[in-house]
Amino acid sequence: MAASGSEQPGPGWACRHPPGHVGSFDESARRASHSELAVANLLTAEGHDVRTVAEARSRRTPDLAACGVTVEVKAFGTLEQRAGAIPRARQVANKLLVARGQGTVAVVWGQGSGLSEATARAGFDLFCHRAQEKGTGRLRSARVVGDGFDIALSPAERLQATQRLVPQGREGGPAGKPLSRPGVPKQGDKPGTAPRPVIQPPRGSGPRPPGRRPGAARLSM
């Protein structure tokens, strides 16, 4: 399934190819797996020159390089191989979390697995939610290919949009999390719990005037 048009190669790509141009594929460094070969065929049909990348023992390496861009391929087995189990959003997110340390572009290959576009998008959303704490690593583009769909998404754009949707409050915190006031239950407190008591200072605990001792009575003249 080739991407439509050559003017918009998707996030993570800086190259441009004329319509109808077919790239090349070189697997002299390492023989490609079935899923890697499927992704390589997809990319060459879009005009990219693709090659396999030799594995290294001392560091994590991507599976492919396409026009100088590192590509990591993560694949789901077929429904038969998975005993009928359909991929879930959490599994899509986990594959992207692993791929972020290996390639600039991650391609999740899900054809024949029963993966739906809705699940793929939900998995990407879950990945972006986790990436707020874990980071996106090398990843600049996530592409998910399944039966009848091919979507390319940008984690950086999603995270920037999420940050813009969280306004800052007067005290520097998110406006959606107001500061708690004494005697008012905090958001998230269990229903039915009593409000926290307001602790007032005891009477007479303020500053004493000079010359007065605690408990000393004032003489009336």
Image (cartoon, helix red, strand yellow):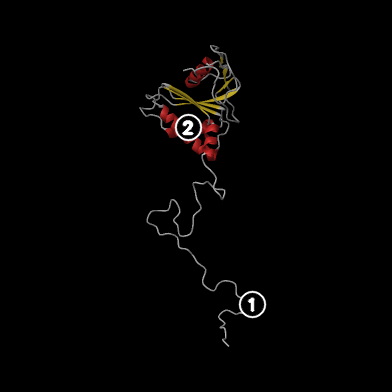
What quarter of the picture does the C terminus occupy? bottom right
Q: Residues within 10 Å of mark 2 (few under 14, many from 20)?
A: many
Please, is residue 125 above or below residue 216 in the view?
above
Dot 1 amino acid type: Pro
Depth order, front residue of 194/101: 194
Please, is residue 30 above or below residue 211 in the view?
above
Please, is residue 177 above or below residue 115 in the view?
below
**Disc number lying in front (1 or 2):** 1
Q: Which residue is mark 1?
A: 210
What's the residue at 48%, 31% (across, down)? 95
x and y percent of residue 41 in the render? 50, 16
SS of the residue at dot 1?
loop
What's the residue at 54%, 38% (across, down)? 164
x and y percent of residue 94 in the render? 48, 34
> Where residue 124 is drawn, which disc sits there?
2
Q: Residues within 10 Å of mark 1 (few under 14, many from 20)?
A: few
Spatial CA span between label 1 and label 2: 69 Å
What's the residue at 50%, 50% (across, down)? 178
Q: Is residue 28 left or right of residue 189?
A: right
Q: Which residue ends up furthest to the left in the rendered image?
A: 84
What's the residue at 49%, 38% (across, down)? 129
x and y percent of residue 182 in the render? 48, 59
Depth order, front residue of 21/196: 196
Depth order, front residue of 78/185: 185
Dot 2 amino acid type: Phe
